[in-house]
Image: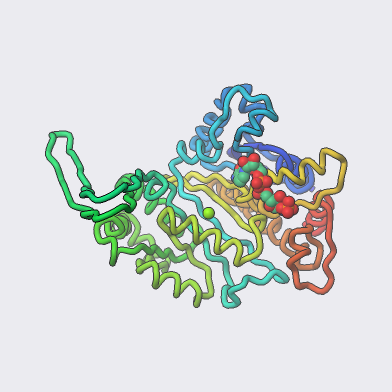
Amino acid sequence: MSKIQMKTPIVEMDGDEMTRIIWQYIKDELISPYIDLKSEYYDLGLKKRDETDDQVTIDSAKAALKYGVAVKCATITPNDARVEEYKLKKMYKSPNGTIRGIMDGTIFRAPILIKGVKPHVWNWEKPITLARHGYGDVYKNTEIKVPGAGKAELVFTAEDGSEIRKTIHEFKGPGVLQGTHNLDSSIESFARSCMNYALSVHQDLWFASKDTISKIYDGDFRDIFASVYEKEFKEKFEAEGLEYFYTLIDDAVARVMRSKGGFIWACKNYDGDVMSDMMASACGSLAMMTSVLVSPDGKYEYEAAHGTVQRHYYKHLKGEETSTNSVATIFAWSGALRKRGELDGIRELQDFADRLEKATLDTIESGEMTGDLALISDLPNVKKLNTLDFIKAVRSRL
Ligand code: NAP
Ligand code: MG
């Protein structure tokens, strides 16, 4: 059998612990036998990040912008314990945060639905993709614990010294205060990422906020989305038969619950934080979720939404058997290969990505799965496989 040939390399960002083990299994069993893999390899394992003072993370993100498609393994975000464990020179920042900053991206997350693991909302037939804005609001707030009676004001001082001043509240006793902000440039990037992504996956886009109460702040989000849509996307959406739809967040929640799924739901930072956890748990687990970071100009970084599965890794190191779910990491690879195939016009690569995903889902639906799914599956003939045997079972179907 001749291997599928590639034109442009995929940016490969290797990672840590159990997911690094899985990464190699996937390449050996599911990718290399079928594809003449062209990749530009960056080792984001903690040891290499430390050796390079984290330059390798920055280089990998720049490579993602240069080539347009990257696939990332889960990585350790160092804390005190990790600094000690790996004898690090310093406590490096989260690689995901660094990459997100350089790519200025929006994260899209969608559950992978399978027979035998039913979503708790029975009418969801297709996944709902959650798009979360990654900047500002309550995540960059300034807060004051008000000690007692007094006047709180909101003041903006322009560069020329002129002021805008509004009274927040005349306090009669103790209370609390919070100041939040966002940037038109960041909201515009977010809108553009969502609209490009909707076109690329051929789905409708919903955006919701609380603009009836927050007339200026949430109103700004609503107006920027509307203006980006009118100026840059309306014609493209109409040509594809797709809809951009704005509604109040309360209405969106009610509609999502009644829907069949199959659309993109864009959320402000806090709404996205809370709603993505709800979607993931309503559909099974974090290991059954796709995750892709998309930059405003359409560069893609595919990853798994879960971490490095440290507890399983320590078992693995002791020579004990593990049953770690590799589905999210397999789908990160298939997503990246499919996108590379689309951009380079390589049909075989796109077809291969479809077959890899189908083989993975068929394996689970036939009853062969890892321990996390075996616990929640209602299939009659469930067989729990270890980490490598699951990947081998996928290969035999592939
Ligand atoms: P985690 O790796 O997501 O794992 C937490 C627990 O969730 C596991 O112990 C396991 O439960 C279950 N789990 C997660 N993924 C699984 C999978 N693929 N298959 C089966 N079970 C799975 O989170 P963590 O252990 O709290 O964090 C470990 C490291 O990951 C941290 O250093 C953190 O910084 C990093 N992290 C990285 C990313 C990323 O790079 N995207 C995201 C989050 C965290 P049981 O133990 O009960 O089996
Ligand atoms: Mg959360």
Q: Position of residue 74 (x, y in %)?
A: 64, 42
Q: Position of residue 367 (x, y in %)?
A: 80, 67
Q: What colouring style does the render use?
A: rainbow
Tell me the residue at 62%/32% (across/down). Answer: 42
Could you say which quadrant of the image residue 318 lies in? top right
| Residue 22 visible in image | yes
User: Which of these two is toward me, 368 or 51?
Assistant: 51
Tell me the residue at 62%/72% (across/down). Answer: 120
Q: Quadrant of the C terminus?
A: bottom right
Tell me the residue at 37%/45% (across/down). Answer: 141
Could you say which quadrant of the image residue 195 lies in? bottom left
User: Which of these two is toward me, 241 or 364?
Assistant: 364
Residue 243 in the image: above or below residue 29? below
| Residue 330 visible in image | no
Q: Position of residue 347 (x, y in %)?
A: 61, 53
Residue 232 in the image: above or below residue 86? below
Q: Position of residue 378 (x, y in %)?
A: 76, 72
